[in-house]
């Protein structure tokens, strides 16, 4: 694989080939992590502000749900169509283009005067925000195999932090400056990140030989011929659904049973962001060969803490619920890091496509969690929601228990 560890601005010469990369500096690792978190956070801002946006743009009733759905559809399309390009186009340029596209989408959302223009902008935000999933395998290319798990963990910690902070940040900014302000602020942040990455990122030109159509077609082949990809995408998809289940249901519980305001719910979500601290630990476990043990621990942790969350909701214990949020998020993040460590080790030349397939499946399965949460909470209350999350944990734990019999390479 050809790439250069020098920033592109320092040299216009053709890239050199190295058998083993030297790794990332702490500063560049932080920049990767911050960029991933800032980009992915964009798909969650509107979710927190759906009431304010729909009222302002006269999008009422059942149509208000499209504010979230369209952004998610855009992200799913980007995962499939853009992330795979990391195996075809120079990665640095691709990342910069996605940042520019995200900034334009955010600016479009900020100035929208109608529901139509906002929804179009929302799709663009989701579509280009998937550039974060170009950065993750990009980072893995730039480090030796022995430290790949640690690097992925550090970068993914930034990504998860962006997800967890997006909703409370959007609520806090909107309460002071209106709902449009968060889109303007994030657009400016995307441009700042673009400039920083333009200066700091090395170039990485994938090996040629495939056309875009062949790249897309090969993704299906990778899926049906790679058991580790199938399993890990299934595990994380169900676990991510449980993550969405918890974070869709908990605001309902906090507002109805605890009488929390939007600001207090935002502060609760900030406390849950501490789960991102598990990512670097998970990366180190993977590098030391404890992937199977770490996976089992994550699945058991998820199941147990959903049961504790059910009790905490009925006991009206906010301290216990905060711990539940932290441990559930930690379990989700741990399995994600371990899974991506495996995925990126399968085929160096196809990391972009492998990640595109993996994340598309994870996103599609995970998006069901919000709908399941709404239904379970409506018909059975908080205990039903938590029992559903625990059952999801048992499903993946049962599937994981069959790995040895199937001789899966994970």
Image (tube, rainbow, N blue to C red):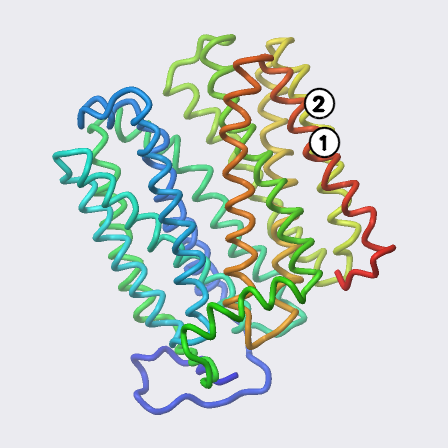
Question: Dot 2: what SS?
Answer: helix
**Left or right: 275 with respect to 235?**
left
Q: Nearer the viewer, residue 337 or 382?
A: 382
Q: Which residue is drawn at the image coordinates 31% and 64% (left, top)?
A: 196
Image quadrant in which you'd find residue 340: bottom right
Q: Is residue 196 above or below residue 373?
A: below
Residue pointed to by mark 1 = 303
Q: Quadrant of the C terminus?
A: bottom right
Task: Bin the neighbour count of mark 1 within 10 Å (Cα to Cα): few under 14, some 14-19, many 20 and up.
Answer: many
Q: What x and y, as percent, mark residue 383?
A: 64, 15
Q: What x and y, as percent, mark residue 262?
A: 37, 19
The residue positioned farthest toward the right in the image shown:
405
Task: Bin the neighbour count of mark 2 within 10 Å (Cα to Cα): few under 14, some 14-19, many 20 and up.
Answer: some
In whole angstroms, how far apart are the C-alphas of marks 2 and 1?
7 Å
Q: Is residue 316 above or below residue 353?
A: above
Q: How many marks?
A: 2
**Circle on res. 187:** none
Q: Is residue 122 above or below residue 80?
A: above
Q: What x and y, as percent, mark residue 341?
A: 64, 61
**Left or right: 259 with respect to 19?**
left
**Left or right: 406 with respect to 73?**
right
CB under 8 Å between discs 2 and 1: yes
Residue pointed to by mark 2 = 307
Image quadrant in which you'd find residue 395: top right
Q: Nearer the viewer, residue 326 or 212?
A: 212
Question: Dot 1: what SS?
Answer: helix
Q: What x and y, as percent, mark residue 298?
A: 71, 42
Q: Which residue is drawn at the image coordinates 46% and 58% (left, top)?
A: 133
**Left or right: 227 with respect to 370?**
right
């Amino acid at each position: 694989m050809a790439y250069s560890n020098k920033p592109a601005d320092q040299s216009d010469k053709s890239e050199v080939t190295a058998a083993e990369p030297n790794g990332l500096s702490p500063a560049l690792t932080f920049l990767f992590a911050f960029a991933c978190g800032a980009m992915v956070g964009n798909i969650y801002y509107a979710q927190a502000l759906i009431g304010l946006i729909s009222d302002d743009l006269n999008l009422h009733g059942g149509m208000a749900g499209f504010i979230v759905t369209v952004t998610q559809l855009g992200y799913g399309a980007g995962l499939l169509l853009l992330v795979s390009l990391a195996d075809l186009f120079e990665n640095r340029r691709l990342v910069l283009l996605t940042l520019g596209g995200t900034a334009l989408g955010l600016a479009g959302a900020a100035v929208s005067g109608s529901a139509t223009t906002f929804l179009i902008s929302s799709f663009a935000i989701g579509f280009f925000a998937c550039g974060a999933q170009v950065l993750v395998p990009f980072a893995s290319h730039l480090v030796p195999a022995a430290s790949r798990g640690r690097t992925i963990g550090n970068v993914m910690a930034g990504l998860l932090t962006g997800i967890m902070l997006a909703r409370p940040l959007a609520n806090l900014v909107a309460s002071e400056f209106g709902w449009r302000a968060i889109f303007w602020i994030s657009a400016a942040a995307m441009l700042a990140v673009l400039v920083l990455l333009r200066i700091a990122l090395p170039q990485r030109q994938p090996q040629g030989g495939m056309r875009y159509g062949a790249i897309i077609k090969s993704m299906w082949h990778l899926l049906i011929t790679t058991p580790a990809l199938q399993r890990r995408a299934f595990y994380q998809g169900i676990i991510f659904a449980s993550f969405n289940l918890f974070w869709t249901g908990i605001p309902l519980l906090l507002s109805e049973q605890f009488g929390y305001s939007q600001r207090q719910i935002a502060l609760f979500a900030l406390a849950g962001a501490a789960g991102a601290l598990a990512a670097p630990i998970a990366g180190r476990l993977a590098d030391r060969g404890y992937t199977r043990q770490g996976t089992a621990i994550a699945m058991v942790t998820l199941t147990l803490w959903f049961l504790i969350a059910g009790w905490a909701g009925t006991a009206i214990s906010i301290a216990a619920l905060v711990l539940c949020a932290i441990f559930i998020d930690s379990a989700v993040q741990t399995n994600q890091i371990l899974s991506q460590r495996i995925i990126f080790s399968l085929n160096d030349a196809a990391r972009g496509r492998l990640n595109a397939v993996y994340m598309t499946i994870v996103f599609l399965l995970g998006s069901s969690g919000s709908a399941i949460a709404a239904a379970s909470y409506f018909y059975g209350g908080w205990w039903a929601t938590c029992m559903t999350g625990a059952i999801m944990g048992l499903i993946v734990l049962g599937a994981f228990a069959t790995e040895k019999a199937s001789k899966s390479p994970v």
